[in-house]
Image: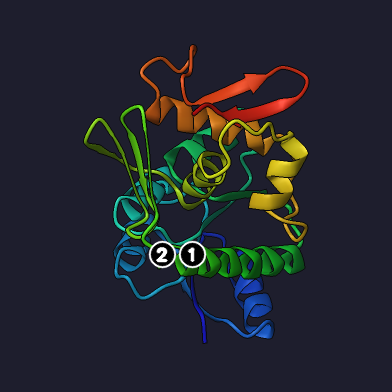
């Protein structure tokens, strides 16, 4: 049975999330404050973390960052903070998904399932020994690691998956819609706006000058391609 950690200080919301996850076959634990939530989140026993941003003792951003420094497991934010800047910040810290309150608990359960399936498919792909090398950028599919000029770069699961997809298909232009459907799939409830957000995050991490990228090129009105 898959284990999910819910870090949420609103007892009613936390129990609603837990009940729907249990109905869908998951084991779900609840923690109501940030400090205890962080301790459990980095224990390594959970396959998905669901975290609120506004928590007592330690906020959700700190928890996301700490988990991402150790694990590549899916992290889903469920928060009342609905501004784009909050969503972008959550993704920048390493979250894979973002749901705003009020939300559909059935949708949350569907997203948990989607992220677990994609994470496991990605792990399966990484059993191969393929290594992509290009202009100081190294993508190692076997170890799920990325290096720029020998320095390891920390990417989220979605960032890695997107970068690996583009780098595996050099010089081919892909639309936002194609990238979205390939990386996030039909069972994801977001929209294509997440694609440029993730590409910008990747550029900040791997490019010498994110405003003048050498790896991932934007073709305005068309899409993106990886330059070989």
Residue at the (65%, 38%) spot, across then down = 194
Residue at the (52%, 50%) spot, across then down = 161
Figure disc tally: 2
Quadrant of the rendered structure where residue 25 is? Answer: bottom right
Q: Do the numbered discs 2 and 1 sit on residues whose CB atoms are within 8 Å? A: yes
Quadrant of the rendered structure where residue 187 is? Answer: bottom right
**Visible residue check, residue 6:** no
Q: Is residue 65 above or below residue 199?
A: below
Q: Is residue 97 above or below residue 176?
A: below
Residue at the (51%, 60%) spot, across then down = 8
Helix, strand or loop at mark 1: helix
Alpha carbon of mark 2 to alpha carbon of mark 1: how far? 6 Å
Would residue 204 appear left or right of 83 to someone viewing this image? Answer: left
Q: On the image, numbered disc 1 is attached to which residue?
A: 125
Helix, strand or loop at mark 2: loop
Q: On the image, numbered disc 2 is attached to which residue?
A: 128
Would residue 38 appear left or right of 175 to someone viewing this image? Answer: left
Q: Most extreme residue toward the left, as rendered?
A: 150
Which colour style is shown? rainbow
**Visible residue check, residue 201:** yes
- Expressed as whole percent of the image width and height from the top left, the position of residue 164 reads 50, 46
- Expressed as whole percent of the image width and height from the top left, the position of residue 57 reads 34, 50
């Amino acid at each position: 049975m898959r284990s999910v950690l819910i870090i949420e200080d609103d007892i009613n919301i936390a129990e609603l999330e837990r009940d729907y996850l249990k109905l869908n076959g998951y084991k779900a634990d609840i923690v109501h404050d940030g400090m205890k939530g962080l301790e459990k989140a980095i224990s390594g026993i959970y396959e998905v973390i669901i975290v609120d941003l506004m928590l007592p003792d330690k906020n959700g951003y700190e928890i996301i960052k700490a988990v991402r420094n150790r694990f590549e497991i899916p992290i889903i934010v469920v928060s009342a903070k609905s501004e784009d800047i909050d969503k972008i910040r959550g993704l920048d810290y390493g979250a894979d998904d973002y749901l705003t309150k009020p939300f559909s608990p059935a949708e949350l359960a569907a997203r948990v399932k989607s992220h677990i399936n994609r994470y496991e498919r990605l792990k399966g792909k990484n059993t191969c020994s393929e290594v992509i090398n290009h202009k100081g950028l190294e993508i190692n599919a076997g170890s799920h690691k990325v290096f720029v000029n020998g320095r390891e770069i920390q990417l989220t699961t979605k960032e890695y998956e997107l970068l690996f997809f583009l780098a595996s298909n050099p010089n081919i232009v892909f639309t936002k819609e194609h990238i979205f459907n390939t990386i996030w799939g039909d069972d994801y409830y977001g929209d294509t706006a997440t694609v440029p957000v993730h590409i910008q995050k990747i550029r900040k991490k791997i490019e010498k000058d994110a405003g003048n990228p050498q790896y991932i090129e934007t073709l305005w009105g068309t899409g993106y391609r990886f330059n070989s």
